[in-house]
Image (tube, rainbow, N blue to C red):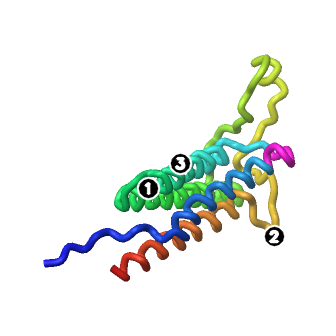
Amino acid sequence: MAVALPRPVPRVARLLALLVPAGAMATALTAQYGFGLSPCEMCWWQRYAHIAALVFALAAFVVPGVRPARLLVWLAVAAIATSGLLGFYHAGVEYHWWEGITTCSTTHLSGDPLDAIMNAPIVRCDVPAWTLFGISMAGYNALGSLGAAALIAVLIGRQRQKV
């Protein structure tokens, strides 16, 4: 009886698992620091998921062994999909399809706490900071992240069928 050895994750799948959250974070940080679009609470949730995906994807490139790399890429896919689902939820709140969190949030504070609190912008989760063709950044994150997670999963699944 032959034992099937696990095959390595396709390089393109590992690369996408790294580039998708890196691109999403680069876009978010450019919007924040380049164009002054302060993130709301739900924006931060999406970022946390992308940061987790980055960590998993980077680890998949450096951890020895096929099984750990495969697991790490799947964890990156799960984190990317989580950010996409959070983006979908956030977009629904922005389009008033459902009610989101009831409190507004502010940007992270630094320096004199009282001065920072008094001058911090209120960032509402139910008002998109930016839209293009009627789709907010959260909506684009949902479309891109869910699509990318599905594509990476298909790439890994297709490779697995070749075994």
Residue 75, magenta (yes or no)? no
Q: Nearer the viewer, residue 115 or 28?
A: 28
> Which mark, residue 133?
2
Tag 3: amino acid: Val
Residue 97 seen anywhere in this rendered image of the structure: no
Q: Nearer the viewer, residue 121 or 157?
A: 157
Residue 98 seen anywhere in this rendered image of the structure: yes
Residue 119 percent across, percent down from the top left: 84, 27
Q: Main secondary structure of the magenta part?
A: helix
* Residue 3 sits in quarter: bottom left
> Which mark, residue 72?
1
At 82% across and 19% down in the image, what residue appears? Answer: 115
> Which mark, residue 9?
none
Callout 3: SS: helix
Residue indicated by mark 3: 55
Q: Where, quadrant-wise, is the C terminus in this rendering?
A: bottom left
Mark 1 to mark 3: distance in Å? 9 Å
At 81% across and 35% down in the image, what residue appears? Answer: 121
| Label 3 CA crowd tier, 10 Å (few <14, some 14–19, many 20+) | some
Q: Nearer the viewer, residue 145 or 122?
A: 145
- Tell me where the magenta segment starts and ends, as one range: 31-37
Tag 1 near tag 3, CB within 8 Å: no
